[in-house]
Structure formats: structure tokens, C-alpha cells
Image (tube, grey):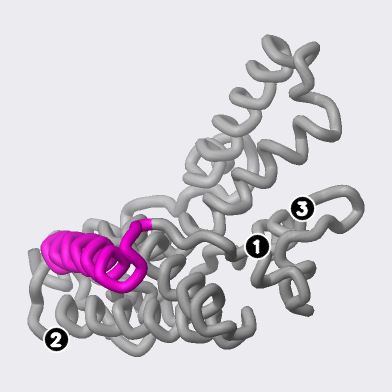
């Protein structure tokens, strides 16, 4: 299909209504909103008397939702761009070991250990993104390999250095750390994790409407994507 043909085909189409019931039904966000409302109503009816609607119950499920949302938001950005990152779960475990081991064994402060964990995660993400974008290898395969590499290294290094896959004594080491209460404390009787979940950025469309391809949460590896061959070019 040529550009002229695509323009002639698209010229006769009426734009989708932005408002009204029909316009709302065409919005992809409405599916997620309706699903959330339906799930809440079902649990409120079935488990309302069991503590679901209480402050403690609300705190419990919102805390879990905030943690999943913080991890799921960057993954959603990858899915929107047509990419995958299968190494997310393994990366969380590996970063946890990297953060906890220096604190317990070397007496590092929390900010230094967290910085080391973020640096390692950013490096792995940059490698994933560079391999995917520069070498044109599918992100599914790249991150699948990264997942097995991190899993093997995590088991081998933890067994070799600490003799176990778990790090003990972390809470005792962080008892006097000034940053620790800010991460595990409560604010208005709600866990601090909810603040991070509520501050998640919204998925917005840029003014240029140019999609980007990246994987591993690396913005440095992101490059503009060419429109797929089956997509009709936009009208000027």
C-alpha cells in the first residue's frame, strides 16, 4: 500500500469521538478501570465482613499493589513498545543480594549499598538494551539469557562468599541507619511503600508520537522505532 493509497483510504474515515459513551468505550484505559471496579466490588461483597473494607485490610492490599505497581510500570512501558524483559524477577533477587551483603559483612550504610544495587541494575539494563537495539536481537531472547545468567551468578556467588543463599542480620545492622525508618516506617498509619506506588508516573504520549524501543529499563539504549510495515503512515 502506497502513501497516496493510505491517505485516500484514511481520508474517508471519521475520527473517533473523544467524548460520550461511544468515545469512552473506545478508550483502552476503560477496560482496566472497569476491571478494577469489578474486582473491588466482588471482594467487598464476599470479604467485606472479613476485614477487606477495614483500614488494616486496605493497608495490606494497597501495600502489595504498590510494590507490584512500582515494578510493573517500567515493564508496561516495554510492552507498549513491543518489547519484553524476562529478567525483572531475577534482577530483583540479585539486586537484593548486592544491597544486603555489603551492609551485613562490611558495615556499609544503606544509601551506599542501595546506590551499588541501582548501579548494578542500571548496568544490566544498559547491556540488555544495547544488545537488543544495536544487534537487533529480540529482547525476549536477550533478557531470557540475562535471567539465567543472573540466577546462576546469584546462586554461585552467594554460596561461594556467604555459604548460603540468604543474608541474615540485615535488620540488626540497619537499626541505627537514618535512612531505614524512611523506607519501612508508616505515614498516616499507611506504609511508606504506598507513597512510592502513588507517585508512579502516568503513561503519556509524547507530542512527537514517535515510539521508542528499549529494554532493561535503560533510557540510554532507547532508539526511535520505525513504524511497522503494516501500519499506515499518519496524515500530515
User: Is residue 149 within the magenta segment?
Assistant: yes
Residue 157 location (% of width, % of height) = 26, 71
User: Is residue 36 within the magenta segment?
Assistant: no
Q: Is residue 225 left or right of residue 191?
A: left
The kind of secondary structure element at disc 1 is helix
| Residue 216's disc number | none
Q: Which residue sits at x=75%, y=23%?
A: 52
Q: Residues within 10 Å of mark 3 (few under 14, many from 20)?
A: some
| Residue 191's disc number | 3
Q: Which residue sits at x=35%, y=57%?
A: 165
Q: Looking at the picture, does residue 168 appear above or below residue 41?
A: below
- Find out whether the residues at labels 1 and 2 contact each other: C-beta distance under 8 Å: no
Residue extending furthest front?
163
Q: Which residue is mark 1?
A: 171
Q: Looking at the picture, does residue 44 appear above or below residue 96?
A: above
Instruction: Give the quadrant of the N terminus.
Output: bottom left
Q: How far apart, in angstroms, are the residues tagged by discs 3 and 1? A: 17 Å
Residue 76 location (% of width, % of height) = 42, 58
Magenta segment: 139-165
Q: Residues within 10 Å of mark 1 (few under 14, many from 20)?
A: few
Q: How far apart, in angstroms, are the residues tagged by discs 3 and 2? A: 41 Å
Q: Which residue is mark 2?
A: 134
Amino acid at each position: 500500500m502506497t502513501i497516496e493509497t493510505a491517505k485516500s483510504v484514511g481520508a474517508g474515515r471519521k475520527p473517533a469521538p473523544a467524548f460520550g459513551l461511544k468515545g469512552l468505550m473506545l478508550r483502552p484505559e476503560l477496560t482496566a478501570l472497569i476491571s478494577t471496579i469489578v474486582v473491588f466490588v466482588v471482594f467487598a461483597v464476599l470479604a467485606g465482613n472479613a476485614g477487606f473494607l477495614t483500614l488494616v485490610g486496605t493497608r495490606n492490599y494497597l501495600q502489595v499493589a504498590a510494590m507490584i505497581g512500582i515494578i510493573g510500570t517500567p515493564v508496561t512501558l516495554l510492552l507498549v513498545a513491543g518489547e519484553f524483559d524476562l529478567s525483572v524477577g531475577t534482577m530483583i533477587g540479585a539486586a537484593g543480594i548486592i544491597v544486603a551483603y555489603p551492609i551485613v559483612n562490611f558495615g556499609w550504610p544503606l544509601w551506599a549499598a542501595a546506590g551499588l544495587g541501582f548501579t548494578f541494575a542500571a548496568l544490566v539494563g544498559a547491556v540488555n538494551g544495547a544488545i537488543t537495539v544495536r544487534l537487533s536481537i529480540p529482547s525476549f531472547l536477550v533478557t531470557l539469557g540475562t535471567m539465567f545468567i543472573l540466577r546462576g551468578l546469584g546462586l554461585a556467588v552467594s554460596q561461594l562468599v556467604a555459604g548460603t543463599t540468604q543474608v541474615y542480620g540485615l535488620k540488626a545492622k540497619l537499626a541505627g541507619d537514618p535512612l531505614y525508618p524512611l523506607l519501612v516506617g508508616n505515614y498516616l498509619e499507611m506504609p511508606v511503600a504506598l507513597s512510592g506506588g502513588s507517585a508512579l508516573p502516568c503513561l503519556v504520549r509524547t507530542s512527537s508520537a514517535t515510539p521508542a524501543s528499549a529494554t532493561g529499563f535503560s533510557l540510554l539504549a532507547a532508539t526511535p522505532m520505525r513504524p511497522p510495515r503494516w501500519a499506515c503512515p499518519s496524515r500530515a
